Amino acid sequence: MKLVSARYPLTLLAAYALVWIALAIAPTDRWSWFLENLLILPFVAVLTLTWRRFAFSNVSYVLIAIYLCVHAIGAHYTYRQVPLGGWVRAAFELQRNPFDRIGHCAFGLLLVYPLREIVGRLAGVRGALVYWLPIAGVLALSSVFEVIEAVVADIVSPGAGPTWLGAQGDEWDAQMDMAAALGGACTAMLIACLIERMTARTPAVTPP
């Protein structure tokens, strides 16, 4: 697996910073935008500060950057009001804006591979577990985020949690969000498994 030089992640970081700054201007709901970025900014800071000790592959950095951009779009408009989701809703005559589902699916689809690198390189996991543990990790993180959202919603907007969270009338919103993340993670690991089998590559992630 090809590992990166400092220039590559820095270029992606600069590109994401430009996207983030542009979408930080006049968001639909400034308070929601602030809350959506509470965990993202520390996440980016950790990636930046730990680069020398643990550098992800080119592929992982691209996947992370794409997810961060998707999240920045959702934070700018609030997930329930993203125009792209509105177009999808109208085109397929859906009952709700599906962009939040897209965001949760992207969480699993795009971040499970970097998580796989962590599992493979730091924990030394091999065989089938190098596929299954990252999927389990995505599901665990997704459930933790749902709990955090529920707690924050109760603090910020007591009695109006489902509205603030953008459940859009769906009583199974949290479960469906986790299912979307799980589906994305399973899809990504299936693709990774097929590619590695086709190219006769070992599924284990070799350290740098």
Image (cartoon, rainbow, N blue to C red):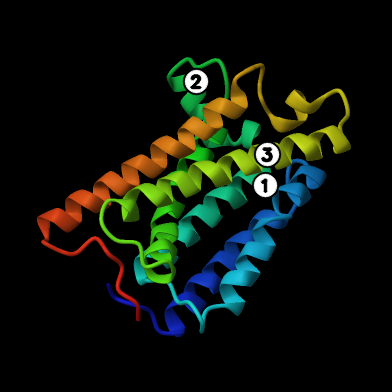
Task: Name the residue tied to disc 1.
Answer: 76
* Mark 3–mark 1 distance (CA, rounded to whole Å): 6 Å
Badge 3 crowding class, 10 Å Cα cut-off, few under 14, some 14 to 19, many 20 or more, is many
Where residue 11 appears, as percent x and y from the top left, is 48, 76
Label 3 secondary element: loop
Label 1 secondary element: helix
On screen, residue 88 versus residue 159, left or right, reads: left
Task: Name the residue tied to disc 2.
Answer: 90
* Mark 2–mark 3 distance (CA, rounded to whole Å): 18 Å
The front one of 204 and 159 is 204
Badge 2 crowding class, 10 Å Cα cut-off, few under 14, some 14 to 19, many 20 or more, is few
**Among the two numbered marks 2 and 1 on one chain, the one whose residue lies closer to the N terminus:** 1
Badge 1 crowding class, 10 Å Cα cut-off, few under 14, some 14 to 19, many 20 or more, is many
Where residue 42 appears, as percent x and y from the top left, is 68, 64
Classify 148 as above or below 10. Answer: above
Classify 59 as above or below 181. Answer: below
Where residue 132 appears, as percent x and y from the top left, is 36, 47
Classify 9 as above or below 39. Answer: below
On screen, residue 120 versus residue 137, left or right, reads: left
Q: Amino acid at mark 2?
A: Ala
On screen, residue 181 versus residue 191, left or right, reads: right
Task: Name the residue tied to disc 3.
Answer: 78
Select label 2 or label 3 by which is in front.
3
Which of the labelled discs sits on residue 105, or is there none?
A: none
Which residue shows up at 46% across the image and 84% down it?
6
Which residue shows up at 77% across the image and 41% down it?
29
Which residue shows up at 48% across the image and 77% down it?
54
Select label 2 or label 1 by which is in front.
1
Quadrant of image for the N terminus: bottom left
Query: Taking the image as drawn, is residue 141 in sight?
Result: yes
Which residue shows up at 11% across the image and 60% down it?
199
Q: Amino acid at mark 3?
A: Thr
